[in-house]
Image (cartoon, rainbow, N blue to C red):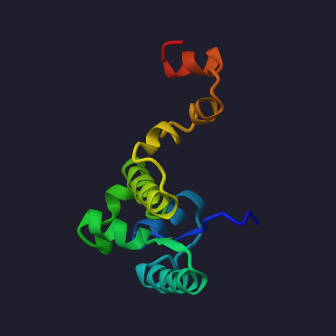
């Protein structure tokens, strides 16, 4: 470990358990139930305790999602299948993590310039090189 490294823990987000269960049954014919907000909250409480005990920052994705959607039982727009984040969920997570990074390490407020949202272009931007022309053609970006 690096002596100046800052650790940021992230709680599980809120879920739409019924939607997840239905998707698993419809697509895979399995009962993958058990994903629920009660478990996400309980797990999150442990994450908060570990963060406090270890002096780490903590991003509470459960509260961020519940707050952004009008309650933990209304996270539908933030998830694509009941569990995994949608584009708007990704944006919410990005903003929450960027805020935690800024608070923990004094990162610049324009963190987008350092960590671009587009995962295809991010490695190129971080390395300061142009992305391959094949990627630009697929994305229909100039280059």
Residue 107 in the figure: left or right of residue 131: left
Q: Residue at x 66, y 63 (%)?
A: 4
Q: Position of residue 132 (x, y in %)?
A: 65, 19
* Residue closest to the eye, 29 or 17: 17
Q: How many marks?
A: 0
Residue 89 lies, with reference to residue 137, above or below; the image says below
Q: Quadrant of residue 119?
A: top right
Residue 36 lies, with reference to residue 125, above or below; the image says below
Q: Is residue 14 visible?
A: no
Q: Residue at x 28, y 68 (%)?
A: 67
Q: Position of residue 65 (x, y in %)?
A: 35, 66
Residue 13 in the figure: left or right of residue 136: left
Residue 126 lies, with reference to residue 16, above or below; the image says above
Q: Position of residue 91 (x, y in %)?
A: 40, 50
* Residue closest to the eye, 35 or 67: 67
* Residue closest to the eye, 32 or 8: 8
Farthest residue, direction right: 1
Farthest residue, direction top: 143
Q: Is residue 103 visible?
A: yes
Q: Position of residue 41 (x, y in %)?
A: 44, 82
Give the quarter of the figure containing the C terminus: top right
Q: Residue at x 76, y 66 (%)?
A: 1
């Amino acid at each position: 470990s690096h002596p100046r490294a800052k650790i940021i823990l992230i709680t599980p987000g809120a879920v739409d358990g019924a939607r997840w269960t239905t998707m698993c049954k419809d697509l895979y014919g399995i009962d993958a139930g058990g994903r629920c907000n009660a478990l996400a909250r309980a797990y999150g409480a442990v994450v908060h305790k570990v963060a406090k005990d270890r002096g780490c920052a903590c991003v509470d994705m459960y509260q961020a999602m519940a707050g952004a959607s009008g309650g933990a039982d209304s996270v539908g727009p933030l998830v694509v299948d009941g569990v995994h984040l949608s584009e708007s969920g990704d944006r919410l997570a990005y903003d929450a993590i960027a805020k935690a990074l800024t608070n923990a390490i004094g990162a610049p407020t324009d963190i987008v310039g350092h960590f671009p949202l587009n995962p295809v272009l991010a490695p190129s931007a971080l390395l300061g090189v142009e992305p391959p022309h094949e990627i630009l053609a697929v994305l229909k970006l100039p280059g």
